[in-house]
């Protein structure tokens, strides 16, 4: 007899609409004989805060769990947290979007039965996403040192810029005078890096981005680097400390510390529909290339023709 598949479920704890989503998900998993494992804070939120009739199931208290795939219920922030929890387990993640944009979490709750059927029949494709690993020179990184989106070095506590010296494979590149610097993956190129002028990278690109945040200099531009490079950042700050944000998880570092960033030894597996196109997603969710002038002209022209 074939062993039942196990699904690890993660979600945030601040969206009331999770009630409907959770019921549909648990019903769908039960219909396919899939065993749910639920992250304990999410389980307690569903059961005690929004009073969902959650079935008895194994709870996840740490990252030491075994599952065949994971489900992220929320937006892209929840997906990043799920990717952190899954870590190096090499299991695919299915993102159900109950948030806003849903760039990573792009499956609809309304199609959950169809989605599970496609997954079990091997009809979904797996996108392999590179991950960044960050180390500091004193070996005291407090949080999880891997990023699916980006590692950002940022000023803190005052309005003064920070100085960020960058070395690539041991060779000096430049020193940025800026509010910060982002090192991002192709996956992260549509996130924080995009908002400060970084380039969009298509999935499968073997690159990392180096994008300054509010640099004090007209000649400073984002760079794309090969992803097998080692990036060393040395920061000077008037406050003698700075923030390191790893996929939004922030911790403070002393400016005597150097950071080393390189490609991690594993990838995150993201489930997608075969017909889903990254370029189509760019246009539909980020309105890539849209021109309000053209849209208004088209609408006006159509309206005039309707009157004929």
Image (cartoon, rainbow, N blue to C red):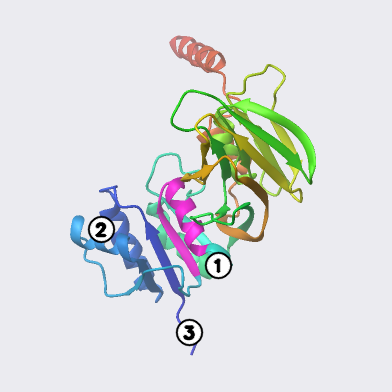
Nearest to the observer: residue 178 or residue 301: 178
**Structural distance between the alpha carbons of marks 1 and 3:** 17 Å
What residue appears at the point 42 percent right and 51 percent down from the top-left corner?
78
Residues in magenta, as a range: 69-86
What residue appears at the point 31 percent right and 59 percent down from the top-left corner?
22
Nearest to the observer: residue 117 or residue 194: 194
> SS class of the residue under badge 1?
loop
**Structural distance between the alpha carbons of marks 3 and 2:** 30 Å
> SS class of the residue under badge 3?
loop
Circle nearer the viewer, 3 or 2: 2
> SS class of the residue under badge 2?
helix
Residue 195 against residue 144 in the figure, above or below: above
Q: Are marks 3 and 2 in contact (CB under 8 Å)?
A: no
Give residue 45's mark. 2
Give residue 3's mark. 3
User: Which badge, 3 or 2, is on the more N-terminal residue?
Assistant: 3
Circle nearer the viewer, 1 or 3: 1
Nearest to the observer: residue 255 or residue 68: 255
Q: Position of residue 257 (x, y in %)?
A: 60, 45
Residue 178 against residue 136 in the figure, above or below: above
Give the residue at mark 1.
91
Q: Is residue 212 left or right of residue 301?
A: right
What residue appears at the point 51 percent right and 70 percent down from the top-left corner?
120
In the image, residue 76 lies in the stretch drawn in magenta: yes
Q: Position of residue 143 (x, y in %)?
A: 49, 55
**Dot 3 surroundings within 10 Å: few (below 14), some, or many (20 or more)?**
few
């Amino acid at each position: 007899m074939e062993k039942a598949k196990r699904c690890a479920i993660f979600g945030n704890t601040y969206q009331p609409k999770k009630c409907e989503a959770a019921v549909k998900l648990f019903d769908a998993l039960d219909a396919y004989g899939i065993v749910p494992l639920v992250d304990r804070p999410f389980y307690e939120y569903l059961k005690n805060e929004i009073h969902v009739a959650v079935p008895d199931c194994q709870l996840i208290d740490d990252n030491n769990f075994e599952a065949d795939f994971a489900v992220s219920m929320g937006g892209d922030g929840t997906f990043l947290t799920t990717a952190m929890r899954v870590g190096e387990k090499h299991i695919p993640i299915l993102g159900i979007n109950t948030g806003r944009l849903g760039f990573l979490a792009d499956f609809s709750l309304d199609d959950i039965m169809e989605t599970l059927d496609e997954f079990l029949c091997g009809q979904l494709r797996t996108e392999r996403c590179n991950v960044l690993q960050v180390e500091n020179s004193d070996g005291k990184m407090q949080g999880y040192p891997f990023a699916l989106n980006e590692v950002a070095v940022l000023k803190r506590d005052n309005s003064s810029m920070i100085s960020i010296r960058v070395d690539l494979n041991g060779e000096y590149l430049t020193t940025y005078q800026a509010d910060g610097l982002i090192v991002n993956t192709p996956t992260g190129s549509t996130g924080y890096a995009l908002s400060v002028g970084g380039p969009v990278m298509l999935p499968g690109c073997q690159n990392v981005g180096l994008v300054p945040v509010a640099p004090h200099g007209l000649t400073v531009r984002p760079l794309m680097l090969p992803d097998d490079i080692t990036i060393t950042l040395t920061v000077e700050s008037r406050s003698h400390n700075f923030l390191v944000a790893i996929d939004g998880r922030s911790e403070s570092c002393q400016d005597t510390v150097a950071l080393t960033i390189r490609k991690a030894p594993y990838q995150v597996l993201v489930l997608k529909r075969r017909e889903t196109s990254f370029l189509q997603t760019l246009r539909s969710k980020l309105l890539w290339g849209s021109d309000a002038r053209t849209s208004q002209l088209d609408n006006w022209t159509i309206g005039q023709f309707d009157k004929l």
